[in-house]
């Protein structure tokens, strides 16, 4: 394809953006674009952006600034902004950076071909609607292109929970679940193309309630339906809300062998006062009870979470409550952030706490989370795990993949192919990964 135009997509933010970028690349493939790994030779640069914290949004403007030279050298270069900053800022982006040709919100990606045609003619295109139709149904897919062994699959999008700090309900819109049959069709197609592990995505994935043949189905029911697909070996899902962990989903962790023993269940804070101010609608005890039930169903499950420190009015005691909750749970993995003011969210109006104090708390929390993570990782040494091999490691002959607990594992001189799942004995624990030996 000598005359193919080149598309450079840079993805920020969560896994849903990774999935969306793949869909956008496929759909622009229909407009004659092939992907390139560098902005330098691109005909179109598309930034798929994240608005979750202030820094994430600011990064976009500085990144755009960097393309000024490229655009000056190549006036035909088209620059687009997609994702959550596009949704939140809309036209403001073109005002701040007039070289931007296209702004597209997360619910309008299926309209990209028409938008691309408009900018190809020298116009500008902006779409931040929340249309009724299922965008994924209208996104073209490149037929049967081979895939790696793992894939994301969005099953639910948007959020109706309105935590007081969070922009997601505004940028992704109301909670919508995709119908079961479409998900199963997409999953079967992924498996035919070489995928062995699917991670179901949603901002509140366990609130899933998509239309099935006999009425709405829950996430647990969807998982059991996916369980029947031959060749699909592993199922994961993220991100969950504690209030939507129903009995059937907890039970599936105990009985569905394809469902991996890893759960990302954000709590944000261990203080009931702060949880209330955050509008989380659960207490620390509620969360701990959910964890207890999950561990009863699947004792070896590895738990992961998200935390925010320095939320408005957080006292020393509130913070100590968070530390106590972390001590009680013991996380194998976690993300922690300093509260970041997001314009338009209720918490942005509240008196903010001292930044230095928030930083100090974040460091203490991260120290504790890191120690727990280390300890759980080190305790894997001597154990047998199963590894889905994904790619060659850094050294010759080495292959790397993920255990069922989502630990990165690498094996020297591994007689395996990409996509193989094998039993491995863990023989060492390194900084960010485990060393294994074939059994
Ligand atoms: N839907 C998921 C997470 C969405 S955002 C959930 O409900 O858990 C991912 C994480 O970013 C959140 O869990 C939270 O910890 C963090 N986050 C969201 N808004 C934030 C803000 N204003 N400041 C700091 N961290 C934030
Ligand atoms: Fe944001 Fe809360 Fe919704 Fe998660 S549940 S996406 S943190 S509003
Ligand atoms: Fe960021 Fe939007 Fe995801 S704000 S975290 S890209 S939903």
Image (cartoon, rainbow, N blue to C red):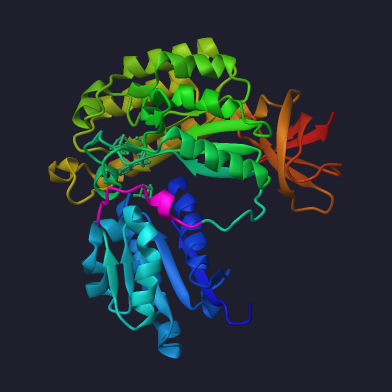
x then y, percent, for residue 419:
73, 42
From this view, report whether residue 32 is shown above or below residue 400.
below
x then y, percent, for residue 397:
84, 50
x then y, percent, for residue 289:
39, 12
Q: Is residue 104 left or right of residue 393?
A: left
Residue at image position (65%, 51%) is 147
Of residue 424 and residue 131, the one placed in the foreground of this image is 131
Quadrant, the N terminus: bottom right
Q: Is residue 116 left or right of residue 150?
A: left
Q: Is residue 265 left or right of residue 399?
A: left
Of residue 77 and residue 60, the one placed in the foreground of this image is 77
Residue at image position (47%, 40%) is 182
x then y, percent, for residue 309:
32, 37
Occupied quadrant, residue 155: top left
Quadrant, the C terminus: top right
From this view, report whether residue 230 is shown above or below residue 416.
above
From this view, report whether residue 299 is shown above or below residue 119.
above
Is 326 in the magenta? no
Query: Where's ligand 1: which quadrant?
Result: top left
Q: Which residues are magenta?
A: 129-140
Residue 269: tell me if it is visible. yes
Residue 303: tell me if it is visible. no
Specify the principal SS of the magenta part: loop
Total marks drawn? 0
Q: Is residue 102 left or right of residue 405?
A: left
Occupied quadrant, residue 319: top left
Residue at image position (33%, 83%) is 122
Occupied quadrant, residue 428: top right
């Amino acid at each position: 394809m000598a005359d193919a135009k080149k598309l450079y997509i840079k993805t920020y933010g969560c896994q849903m953006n990774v999935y969306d970028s793949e869909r956008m690349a496929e759909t622009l493939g229909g407009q004659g674009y092939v992907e390139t790994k560098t902005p330098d030779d691109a005909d179109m640069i598309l930034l798929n952006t994240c608005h979750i914290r202030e820094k994430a949004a600011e990064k976009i403007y500085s990144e755009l600034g960097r393309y000024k030279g490229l655009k000056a050298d190549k006036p035909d270069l088209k620059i687009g902004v997609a994702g959550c900053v596009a949704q939140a800022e809309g036209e403001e982006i073109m005002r701040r950076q007039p070289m931007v040709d296209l702004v597209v919100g997360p619910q309008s990606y299926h309209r990209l071909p028409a938008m691309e045609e408009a900018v190809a003619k020298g116009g500008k295109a902006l779409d931040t609607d929340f249309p009724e139709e299922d965008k994924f149904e209208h996104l073209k897919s490149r037929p049967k292109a081979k895939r790696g062994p793992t894939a994301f699959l969005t099953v639910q999008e948007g959020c109706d929970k309105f935590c007081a700090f969070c922009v997601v309900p505004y940028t992704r819109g109301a909670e919508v679940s995709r119908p079961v049959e479409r998900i199963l069709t997409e999953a079967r197609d992924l498996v035919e193309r070489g995928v062995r592990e699917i991670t179901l995505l949603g901002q509140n994935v366990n609130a899933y309630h998509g239309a099935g043949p006999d009425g709405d189905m829950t996430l647990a029911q969807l998982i059991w339906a996916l369980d029947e697909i031959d060749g699909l070996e592993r199922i994961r899902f993220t991100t969950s809300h504690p209030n939507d962990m129903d009995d059937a989903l907890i039970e599936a962790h105990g009985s569905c062998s394809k469902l991996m023993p890893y759960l990302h269940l954000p709590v944000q804070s261990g203080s009931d006062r702060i949880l209330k101010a955050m509008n989380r609608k659960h207490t620390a005890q509620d969360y701990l009870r959910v964890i207890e039930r999950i561990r009863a169903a699947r004792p070896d499950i590895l738990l992961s979470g998200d935390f925010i420190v320095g939320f408005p009015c957080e006292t020393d005691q509130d913070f100590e409550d968070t530390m106590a909750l972390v001590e009680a749970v013991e996380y194998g993995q976690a993300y922690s952030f300093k509260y970041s003011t997001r314009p338009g969210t209720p918490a942005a109006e509240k008196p903010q706490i001292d930044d230095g104090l928030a930083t100090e708390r974040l460091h203490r929390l991260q120290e504790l989370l890191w120690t727990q993570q280390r300890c759980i990782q080190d305790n894997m040494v001597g154990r047998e795990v199963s590894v889905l091999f994904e790619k060659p490691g850094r050294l010759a002959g080495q292959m790397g993949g993920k255990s069922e607990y989502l630990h990165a594992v690498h094996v020297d001189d591994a007689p395996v192919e990409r996509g193989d799942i094998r039993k491995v004995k863990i023989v060492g624990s390194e900084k960010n990964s485990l060393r294994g030996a074939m059994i």
